Image (tube, coloured by chain):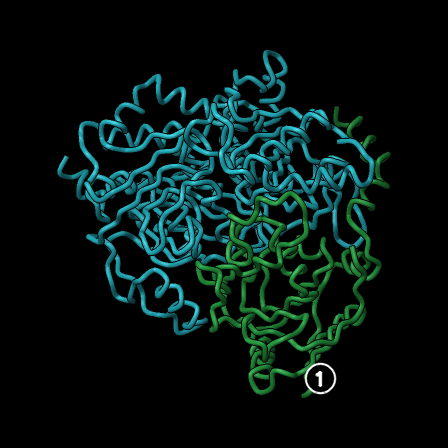
Amino acid sequence: MEKFKKLQSTAIPLPIEDVDTDQIIPARFLKATTREGFGDNLFRDWRYEADGSPRPGFILNNPIYQGQILVAGRNFGCGSSREHAAWALYDFGFRVVVSSFFADIFRGNALNNGLLPVQVSEPFLQAVFSAIEANPATQFLVDLEAQRFTIQATGQSAGFEIDPYKKTCMINGYDDIDFLLNLREEIEAFEQKNS
Amino acid sequence: MSKTLFDKIWDAHVAHPAAGGMDVLYIDRHFIHEVTSPQAFDGLRQRNIPVFRPEKTIATADHNVPTRDQHLPIQEALSRFQVDKLTENCKAFGVRLYGLGHPYQGIVHVIGPELGLTQPGMTIVCGDSHTSTHGAFGCIAFGIGTSQVEQVLATQCLLQKKPKRMRITVEGTLPAGVLSKDIILYIISRLSASGGTGHFVEYAGSAIRSLSMEARMTICNMSIEMGARGGLIAPDEKAIEYVRGREFAPQGEAFEAAAAYWRTLYSDEDAAFDAEYHFRAEDIEPMVTYGTNPGMGMGVSQSIPAPPSKGNAQTFMKSLDYMGFQPGQKLTGRAVNYVFIGSCTNSRIEDLRLAAAYVKGKKKADNVHAMVVPGSKQVEKQAKAEGLDRVFREAGFDFREPGCSACLGMNEDKVPKGEYCVSTSNRNFEGRQGPGARTILASPLTAAATALAGKIVDVRQDLQKG
């Protein structure tokens, strides 16, 4: 997993609520057996017509909006547990998703892949949407160590929560599996006790 | 100290209280399937490590399999590759596989309980959000991502933050024509598609206790649709008797010893929950969804509500536009050309019996394509033994072989663009059953009635007519 400490970037707004993982990556694209390449089909049915031509109204097809931060309405990532959703966002180039609420499984999958979920209040989320609407070139700063998300143009900023353990993992690029493999003896002792 | 059912099971499985608010949770049973496991096995290969406890993982092929001619090689190349990959991985790592052609093959959440692999008090995970199904037996069962599948394969453990506890109590007697699917669609419509997020739900109350084990599975199955990590029901004698004698359940004295422990699994009287909800069974009618998330549901006699004053009216209208509906409309009488009876929510033998009893001796409407997909080879076998396949065929339904099928349209079983499908599955997301498909979630009874009428009907009126 790649390390993440700080990111300054413009952001892409998706002011839709309850974006489910079937929209992020439809099931028919889950047939690959590797983690790479899912970005091509990110938001496939919102982004492309059935014949493969881009749908001009969709935000990812509008060159005015660029950046490594996706800003989305509440309850982002609900539905299926497919980690392919986190892979697709990451593969497309996103490193941060900002929302006022994340579905549990998506949040966990994102953190396990170096994609930082930043949860802010609903009013602050609306302020972020407004800032992008006013100027798509607005820069945002995500500071993981300080757990702070800042709208650079206005200086407005909000703190965000992250488990201390997952924070350490993100900053150092560690996987849970490294941690668990080091606990082999404890796990075996637990099995002994319960057998 | 008083504990909830959830806490009793969780606390018994903490192998190591890790720092930072996470616990190392030991996993008793791990189910895998072809779609969310290949990258996890590759991870093990890259680290050059084996599966730590191969006997605790069970594999099946379900998401991506055809529901016709399963004895022949899979025609679609990518699907075949993925299913072959599962076979290859299971062989290489010593994992038990109930693949295509095996008498135990089926939807992962159907085969676990029917084989007795699912037992009260267990922790169960699978790379599939509907793992919550197994909670019907009093298990902590939840869906995980592929990185976590790899963690369980490598260590039989997961790092988890303990969720909050919610209790949903449903008291009373269900009206005729109202099934457990209607209970859970009703609950989700009240709590919304995110109302359970961060929580593990215990379902309680006389209406829940009165349900069969299969009906309870339908309830727990859809816990994720309100955002909950999982849902569970305290195991009672019904649960214990369901497990007794099944192939992989403990046998003889070992079973009695296990059952004695299972009987201690309930929430203590004064145990505290972070959130509580109460509903009355008498208030529930057959449910249908009108939008593009399972929280957008209503009683079949109701009208589609106006856009919410609080919350995002734009998202609400986008959803109705996709469905081709307007606020204030009723759905009864609306023509529907597709009906799907299947999925991990409603493909068990009781579901098939209910639907078959309803359609017996009748014919589907000419405009309807109706498909019945049993949840497993064992369900299929039982259905055939009871002649249900014949009942369905005579009524003009297509009776298929087991798999996830049109619930998520990974195989050929898709609903065409713009068409409505009354479906017993669990998700009405945009494009879930195929690009542009419009899904209306309902119970097996409402689905069967829709197939006969060719339009959405209130099954209660039909039942009254007798």
* Location of residue A95 in the rendering, given as x and y in whole percent from the top left corner: 70, 65
| Residue at far left of view | B465
- The N terminus of chain B - image quarter: top right
**Which of the two residues, B296 or B257, is positioned nearer the viewer here?**
B296
Task: Please give the letter of the chain rendered in green.
Answer: A
Figure quadrant of residue A193? top right
Picture coordinates of residue B449, whole percent (x, y)? 24, 40
Chain B palette colour: cyan
Judge left or right: residue B211 versus residue A5: left
Task: State left or right for residue B303 relative to residue A89.
Answer: left
Q: Quadrant of residue B175?
A: top left
Residue at figure coordinates x 30%, y 20% from the top left: B387
Q: For mark 1, name the chain.
A: A
**Residue B31 image-quadrant placement:** top right
Residue B157 vs residue B430, the one in the foreground: B430
Q: Is residue B233 visible?
A: no
Image height of B169 relative to A43, above or below? above
Q: Amino acid at mark 1?
A: Gln
Question: Which secondary structure lies at badge 1?
Answer: loop
Note whether residue A30 is visible: yes
| Rendering coords of residue B224 (x, y %) | 52, 48
Q: Which residue is mark 1?
A: A152
Question: What x and y, as percent, mark residue B121?
Answer: 61, 32
Q: Residue at x 77, y 68 (%)?
A: A144
Q: How busy is the neighbourhood of tag 1: few (under 14 within 10 Å), some, or many (20 plus)?
A: some
